[in-house]
Amino acid sequence: MLDEKDNIILYCPEHAPKPHPYTGPMQDLVGKHVKIAFVGKRNTEVREHMWVNVSQVNNDTGYGHLANWPKFVDGIKFADKVKFDRSEIEDIHGLDYYDVKGGS
C-alpha cells in the first residue's frame, strides 16, 4: 500500500489520529500496513501519520518499511526500515475500529 505523494491531510494536535489499543496477536500484523505517527528530528512538535508495511514482530515491537513519502518530518524517507511499539498503532489497513481494538 503506497499513498500518492501528495495525499496529505493536515490536523491540529487536538484532532489528529490517536493510537487505538490493539490487543490482537502482533504476529497477525505481518504483511499488513499500520499507521504510526512519526516525530521530526529537528522539530519535535511536528508529527506525520504514515503507513508502515510490517515485516516482522517481536513481542510488542513491530518492524517494517515506511510506505509513504514524508513531507513534514525530517530524518526519515520512503522505504526506510522503522521500528514501532504496539501502543503507537493508530490504524490497521483493512480492519475496522473494532478489529483494531481486538474486540467486536
Image (cartoon, rainbow, N blue to C red):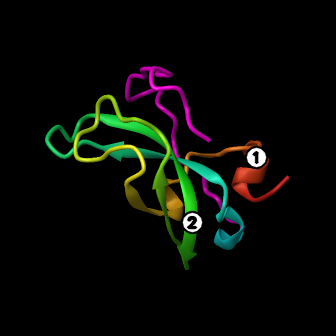
In the rendered structure, which amino acid carries the disc numbered 1?
Answer: Leu
Identify the main secondary structure in magenta: loop
Looking at the rendered structure, the secondary structure element under dot 2 is: strand
Above or below, 13 relative to 101: above
Whether 3 is among the magenta residues is yes
Please give the range of residues in magenta. 1-24
Q: Among all residues in the image, which is located at the extreme bottom? A: 59
Q: Nearer the viewer, residue 92 or 103?
A: 92
| Crowd band around label 2 with a 10 angstrom C-alpha radius: few (<14), some (14–19), many (20+) | some
Q: Which residue is mark 1?
A: 95
Q: Which residue is mark 2?
A: 55
Pick whichever, 59 or 79, lies toward us: 79
At label 2, the amino acid type is Ser
Camera-side residue of 19 and 25: 25
Q: Position of residue 61 (x, y in %)?
A: 49, 71
Q: Position of residue 2 (x, y in %)?
A: 56, 37
- Residue depicted at 53% across the width and 63% down the height: 86
Q: State left or right for residue 91 relative to residue 97.
A: left
Residue 74 counted in the magenta span:
no
SS of the residue at dot 1?
loop
- Which residue is located at x 56 percent, y 46 percent? 90
Front: mark 2 or 1:
2
> Quick one: which residue is furthest to the left in this view?
42
